[in-house]
Image (cartoon, helix red, strand yellow):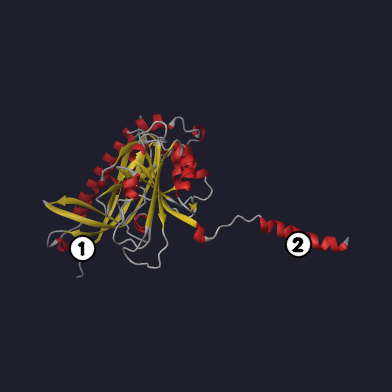
Amino acid sequence: MSRLLRILPLLLLFNVLGGCGFKDIDKRFFVVATGFDLSGNENKPYRITLQLAIPSPQVEPGSSKTQYETIDAPSIAEGIRMLKSYVDKELDFGHCKMFIIGESLARKDITLLVDWMLRRRDIQNVANIAVGRPNAASILHIQPKSERYPGNALLLSFGADGTESSYSYAESLSGLARRISEKGIDPILSIVTNHGDKSYIINQVAIFDKTKIKAVLTPPETQLFNQLTNHFTKASMHGMFGGAKLVVAINKLHSSFQVKNGKDTPLVTMKVSMEVVFEEAPTGIYDVDWKPIEKQLSEEYVKASTKLLKKIQQTDVDPFGFGLRYRADHPKQRNGNEWKSVFAQSQFDIKVDMEIKGTGLIK
């Protein structure tokens, strides 16, 4: 009996090892990017495109090898399941850090799509989400000559390891899910535009209500939005002084806001402080008084910021998160139902403190 008790743990261990379902890396297809579009077919409305990485011994510009698989399906989950019959290896989304939503689908409803991504256990919450124009499939099929391995170029466009652009807005799956579920803040995603077969442009953002696109910001508005939200501060701005064109680089920027109850209407106050350096300026600017220039550029920044805030206010969405601050300061309104009517009546008061730190020249 004692011998049986000693052997029993070993028998149980063998039973656990026999049930292991692990598959080797050479039996997996790693999905590096996924696109979702509308197919135009009522019975199979979703068009799913997978970008699959093919391992290669060479890691150099232009050496990436990619396989694409596309299918039309009645639902996202069924489409992914059916795509397994298209390949000879198991599909693995563990390395998929880029999801592109076609513009037509983004203008209709993204709720079911985001819900599927959150439920699937092998999709990372840090994966980047963006909108593809004209569609997601065309964006995924772009293979820049500089790409070292599949999906690398597009991923670097949204990460700190690659380009640092003041026109792009990086949003993760967890951040998008929070903005969809949270009252008082709405989703916003970058738009990736097809620019030929070998390149793309990322210089606009789309503002959503909880389900679909409500407005698209222009490139200058996109850069200004990134500045006001402290999402990206290394940017530039231009203006005029004394008939001369000025361009300054923003080296430091900090913004904060409050939502107050004004005398007649609610008031959103925003304070912006920045340090700038001249990038383009007329000769002799070093010897003049910079105070009038700082005042002029500050006034122009206030006008542009107020115009942007009013445009967003007219779309009845709140990507800044003013509603979160309002709910925090008004405990009785934490359900968020009152905020939309309050935001529609709000006025904006923006104050800019600009300091010119130099001309960009060594003196």
* 211 versus 252 height, above or below: above
Residue 342 percent coordinates (x, y): 39, 31
User: Toward the viewer: 73 or 180?
Assistant: 73
Residue at 35% x, 55% y: name it. 154
Q: Amino acid at mark 1?
A: Thr
* 347 versus 95 height, above or below: above
All told, the count of numbered labels is: 2
- Residue 191 is at least partly visible in this image: no
Residue 359: image tag: 1
* 164 versus 113 height, above or below: below
The residue under label 2 is 10
**Residues under numbered marks 2 and 1 in contact, where contact means CB atoms less than 8 Å apart:** no
Residue 264 percent coordinates (x, y): 35, 29
User: Toward the viewer: 89 or 209?
Assistant: 89
Residue farthest to the bottom? 363
Quadrant position of the C terminus in the picture:
bottom left
242 relative position to 224: left or right: left
Quadrant position of the N terminus in the picture:
bottom right
Circle 2: element type:
helix
Q: Which badge, 2 or 1, comes first in the chain's sequence?
A: 2
Callout 2 environment at 10 Å: few (<14), some (14 to 19), or many (20+)?
few
Residue at 12% x, 62% y: name it. 283
